[in-house]
Image: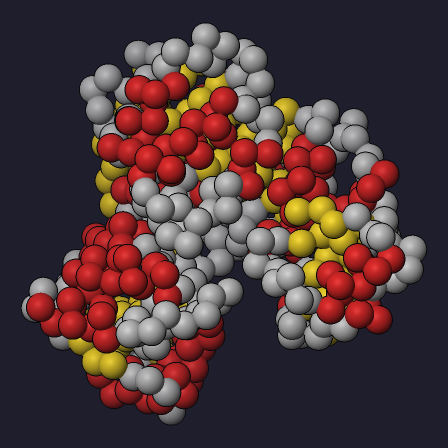
Amino acid sequence: MAPGIPAALERPHFIGIGGAGMSGIAKILAQRGAKVAGSDAKESATAEALRALGATVHIGHAAGHLADDASCVVVSSAIRPDNPELARAAELSVPVVHRSDALAALMEGLRAIAVAGTHGKTTTTSMLAVALSELARDPSYAIGGDLAGPGTNAAHGGGDIFVAEADESDRSFQKYDPQVAIVLNVELDHHANYASMEEIYDSFETFVGKVVPGGTLVVSADQPGAVELTRRVRDIASLDVVTYGESEHADVRVHKVTPRGLTSEVTVVLNGRYLTFTVSVPGSHYAHNAVAALAAGVALGIPAHNLASALGKYTGVKRRLQLKGEAAGVQVVDSYAHHPTEMAADLAAMRGAATDARLLVVFQPHLFSRTQELGTEMGQALALADASVVLDVYPAREDPIPGITSALIIDAAKAAGADVTAVHDQAEVPAVVAGMAKPGDLVLTMGAGDVTDLGPQILDHLSS
């Protein structure tokens, strides 16, 4: 049986309850029987889903939203110190709990798999949640995106396994004590919190050092940052290190990835035996995510052939190369990619899935700090498309940085020979793209902000 509710989380109030990470924790607590409340900036399907579970969700932030009997206030690193509900919590002496501490408390007593890496966390965590559910393991899970099948990002399960996406952006993944840690890749990102690759490595080393004695690190044998991390943690005597990838030295070796339209067939060599299974999303990077999930499940004692079959039931995560529809012979796909490595991987995957199609991209840069540090590389990635539309920077939690705009990306894209157009008014994008697209083309909306809303609007313009 899964554990119940920690005392401090019996009546939690979440500031920003609609966020991907926050809502997942709130859902699990509500399913465990906690009296959940919170607030968010705007109405959403997530807010409605939380209400359906019995949570009280206020729209907008106000001191009066915080109940006098709240057992704690849960916040993420995005919540600003001047939030009125946070100020009210101080007046009432209500404890403030970071979401990572809340998630760590929910994992206590369970065999946790924590999935980390600069890219691919949501997909890999989702693959594990789906496969374990398919095998009747009834896992609990907390993911940074909604599964296409169940349509949710979190669930409380009755089994003894908890699968969690482990966020490195603010070092919060250092709070967890997993039985299995997955590290997909290690790259420089989140520039507001990390000044160098050395700081990134230190942070990941701390995360890996929290694996329980006798636990397992599943880590890429191909990605240079992951290889360097493996070198640094090899001397942890209580840690079993399992590598995966195309390297001939990998413990779980990727023998072949065969594109099958918008799916892939992957063959691995595990313990000297060949094992082939299907991955329902295109691209070798997603196939590698599935192999990492396979290795993690095997580390918990689940038979590899059962896991391989169950992984074939995974049908994707919203915003991870999600087909939004087709109109006038044009397919529209949505991608969450916002780092140059992710952008290049998804563009390559779409090229492999539709070799004869023109690929048109609508890209929205995410965060001023990321654009400042990686704008040139983003522009170079866009050169993989036949034509691109670039929007203004989506600020999310950040204030503008003087001189940092999407022009940095556009200039780099043009220097790399890309056909790129700047559109500053987002309302104009559907008409612009509909004017560019021809039957047989693929349109990819790309970015971590509200660019995802444009897919249906583009389809509407194509249909008219």
In the figure, 58 relative to 6: above or below? below
- Tell me where residue 155 appears, x and y as whole percent: 68, 45
In the figure, 435 relative to 171: above or below? below
Res 69 visible: yes
Q: Residue at x 37, y 87 (%)?
A: 425
Q: Is residue 220 left or right of residue 415?
A: right
Q: Quadrant of residue 275?
A: top left
- Tell me where residue 143 appears, x and y as whole percent: 56, 47
- Tell me where residue 87 appears, x and y as whole percent: 75, 63
- Tell me where residue 39 appears, x and y as whole percent: 73, 66
- In this view, the residue in front, 457 or 62, is 62
Q: Quadrant of the C terminus?
A: bottom left
Q: Quadrant of the N terminus?
A: top right
Q: Residue at x 18, y 76 (%)?
A: 420
Q: Is residue 286 left or right of residue 147?
A: left
In the figure, 35 relative to 406: above or below? above
Q: Residue at x 24, y 32 (%)?
A: 224
